Amino acid sequence: MRVVVIGGTGRTGTYLIPKLIEAGHDVMVVSRQRRVPYQRNKAWDRVVNAVIDRAKEEASGSFGVRIASLEPDIVIDMICYKEESARQLVNALRGRVQMLLHCGTIWTHGPSMQVPSTEDQPRRPIAEYGIQKAAIETYLLDEARRTGFPAAVLRPGHMVGQGWIPVNPVGNFNPKVYCDLAEGKELCLPNLGMETLHHVHANDVAQAFMQALANWSGAVGENFNVTSASALTLRGYSEAIANWFGRPASLSFLAWADWQKTVSPEDAVATWDHIAHSPNCSIEKARRILGYCPRYSSLEAVKESLTWLIQNGRIEVRPA
Ligand SMILES: NC(=O)c1ccc[n+]([C@@H]2O[C@H](COP(=O)([O-])OP(=O)(O)OC[C@H]3O[C@@H](n4cnc5c(N)ncnc54)[C@H](OP(=O)(O)O)[C@@H]3O)[C@@H](O)[C@H]2O)c1
């Protein structure tokens, strides 16, 4: 089949495109060609690149038509952030594709309520990104169930892979947190360190997309959390990483109001975003219907990523 992946050279695409090629699909990747995948793979030699700027084409109302003109059987949309963008695409693809797979997010859940969070719980997003993604999800599932448009939504957790910094044990992206844990320095956690993060390896996200393609009848009209099997508490995550570096974790704790003053405004915003959600998601639906079976636990994914970052000089640590 011809699979068009919109935004296929990023985190997920790095792992997904080789899997699609390996499965025998004709693959077209839509991007602005400003970046290359995080890892080179010979499969990319067999990919056709379509240079399209979604923002520009959407502004002139031609994005959906441009994608339809590529004559896809399947469209995987990695970079849809507004309901209007989804509407434009669906209207152009209606009756012309076998499947539209949308990359959503676990942020559509909003703050965790009953954990692990299942997809049938009400969507209660709390910030603009999650609100928009929830609106897209609602729209696509409604289209699938009401009009038969073949859409499905996969909702990754915090993506981890080789080449970028994973969400760290204080819930932001500051690499110094890993260095401090490696060097046995004290790390201060917000509150009691019991808020949660839910990572997923991008290779497992790619697996979920492949499983959705292979399970059309189960996937269409449905949404699926795509995370590792278990979330981490900030405290447990800190201790595991320190131990991995051969140290006991030296942890202290501060209530949020004081903790936020100890970090940069940018780090505080990222941490708040993560701990206000404190995701802890169930993957039972994806396991049951798609046969999703993550290869990586959260810690395995993060350790692999850290190993890459250290080996490639992106973070410098002096372990015990
Ligand atoms: N990152 C996370 O932890 C996380 C967690 C949950 C959900 N998600 C979801 O994951 C999706 C993003 O996937 P990703 O992280 O794999 O992607 P990514 O790493 O952000 O890569 C973005 C891709 O889109 C292309 N792109 C960006 N702007 C474009 C434009 N205007 N026109 C055409 N192409 C464009 C980029 O290539 P060029 O720059 O060359 O155009 C690249 O191929 C989003 O839907 C997000 O909501 C992410």
Image (cartoon, rainbow, N blue to C red):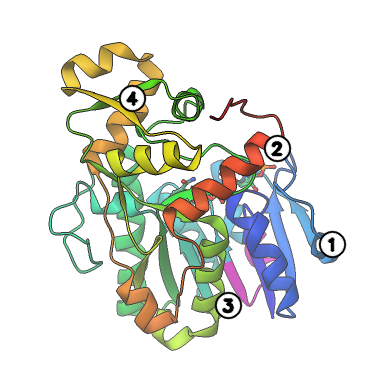
The span picked out in magenta is 66-75
Of 242 and 152, nearer the camera is 242
- The residue type indicated by label 3 comes to Arg
Q: How packed is label 2: few (under 14 Cα within 10 Å), some, or many (20 or more)?
A: few
The residue positioned 75% from the left and 44% from the top of the image is 36
Task: Give the amino acid at mark 2.
Answer: Gln
Label 1 residue near ligand 1, CB within 8 Å: no
Frontmost residue, 98 versus 103: 103
> Amino acid type of disc 1?
Lys
Q: Residue 73's x, y, as percent?
A: 63, 77
Separation (CA) of disc 3 from disc 1: 30 Å
Q: Nearer the viewer, residue 214 or 236?
A: 236
Residue corresponding to mark 4: 269
Residue extending farthest to the bottom is: 217
Q: Percent position (x, y) of residue 251?
A: 29, 27
Q: Circle 2 is placed at which residue position?
A: 311
Magenta segment: does it hold 67? yes
Q: Is mark 2 within 8 Å of ligand 1?
A: no
Q: Do callouts 1 and 4 mark residues in contact (Cβ within 8 Å)?
A: no
- Mark-to-mark CA distance, 1 and 2: 22 Å
Give the residue at mark 3.
96
Pointer 1 residue: 42
- Mark whose residue sits in front, 1 or 2: 2
